[in-house]
Amino acid sequence: MKTIPSNLLMLAVLFSATVMFAQDDANDKEMDDEPAQSNIQQYTPSKLIGKGQVDIKWFNNLYTQTKSTFSDGKEPRQSFFTSTFEFYTGVGQNKRVNLGFIARLRSNVISSQNDERGALDVFNFSGDDNSRAGLTAFAPSIKFVPFPSVSNFSIQSSFFIPLIDEETENGVFLEQKGSVWQNRLFYDYTFPGNKWQLFTELTTELNFGDKDESFANNSLNLNPGVFLSYFPSSKFTILALAQHSQRLDLGNDFAQDFTAIGGGAKYQLTKALNLEVLYTNFVRGSNTGLGQTFNLGLRGIF
């Protein structure tokens, strides 16, 4: 059983300090008048920050399920919480290269016939036989704009290194045991009038390692997604989304796919800090759970 390492406390302190700095800076400058473009309009995942700027994001995802494609009817609840911390800083000129890292914390809980667990039990970090938690993966990362004339198309490349000893203990999965090379291709388009925005992404994940060590090793995951946003004001947006995931068998004898739809909203709290909430429902799939996700994110750019 993993315990929550002290690194997590350091990440929380760093993010809290960053948020306080961003809020103080924004309060000093005031927000009496709405800017022509807020950060949620201008800095989509496609757009990079400039030299000397810092981009910090803390994103929390709670996935919970009582159904899957492996059986018919209701199953004992399984819940998986993932908290991701991303840090980037701009280097060079013309906002074309950002360098940073990604750290991932997970807390997973499963129910048994004699011990039904609620979705929020992932926040107990209890350390019993039906749960596991810990800082599970770390990734150095780079974001870059490959074509100078297309600033709204960018690529994020990260190499995830697992920080766990065992993928599954007592039937509880925590993190896949194997390195992952992840590439995310981002593109956005803002329609005339700045009221509607289309954002698309394609994530590829190449999973390394022996297939006997992880269900995902020696496979390729392809994840396209489409997000359509409407801005009632420059500081607020509502959005609808559709995502698909397709795991291709490259020798691990396990293929998988699912499709999820959902929606959410973003709000610009200060000139530097914005809040994001999302919900998705897994509407179909094969060799997968059919659950739902609840997401909360904070992002600061200064």
Image: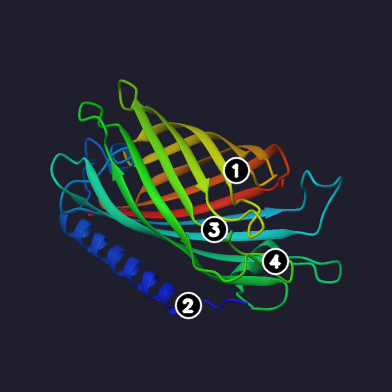
Of the two numbered discs 4 and 3 in the rendering, the one whose residue sits closer to the viewer: 3
Of the two numbered discs 4 and 1 in the rendering, the one whose residue sits closer to the viewer: 4
The residue nearer to you, when weighing 293 against 71, is 71
| Helix, strand or loop under label 1 | strand
| Helix, strand or loop under label 3 | loop
Q: Tell me the residue that label 2 is attached to.
A: 5
As measured in the structure, the alpha-carbon distance from the residue carrying label 2 to the one carrying label 3 is 20 Å
As measured in the structure, the alpha-carbon distance from the residue carrying label 1 to the one carrying label 3 is 27 Å
As measured in the structure, the alpha-carbon distance from the residue carrying label 2 to the one carrying label 4 is 19 Å
As measured in the structure, the alpha-carbon distance from the residue carrying label 4 to the one carrying label 3 is 17 Å
| Image marks 2 and 1: residues in contact by CB distance under 8 Å | no
- Residue 238 position, x and y percent, is 46, 37
- Vertical comparison of 1 with 106: above or below: below
As measured in the structure, the alpha-carbon distance from the residue carrying label 2 to the one carrying label 1 is 30 Å
| Residue 236 placement, left or right of 65 | left
Residue 198 position by quadrant: top left
- Vertical comparison of 178 with 11: above or below: above
- Identify the image quadrant of the C terminus: bottom left
Q: Tell me the residue that label 4 is attached to.
A: 172
- Vertical comparison of 219 with 139: above or below: above
Q: Amino acid at mark 4?
A: Val
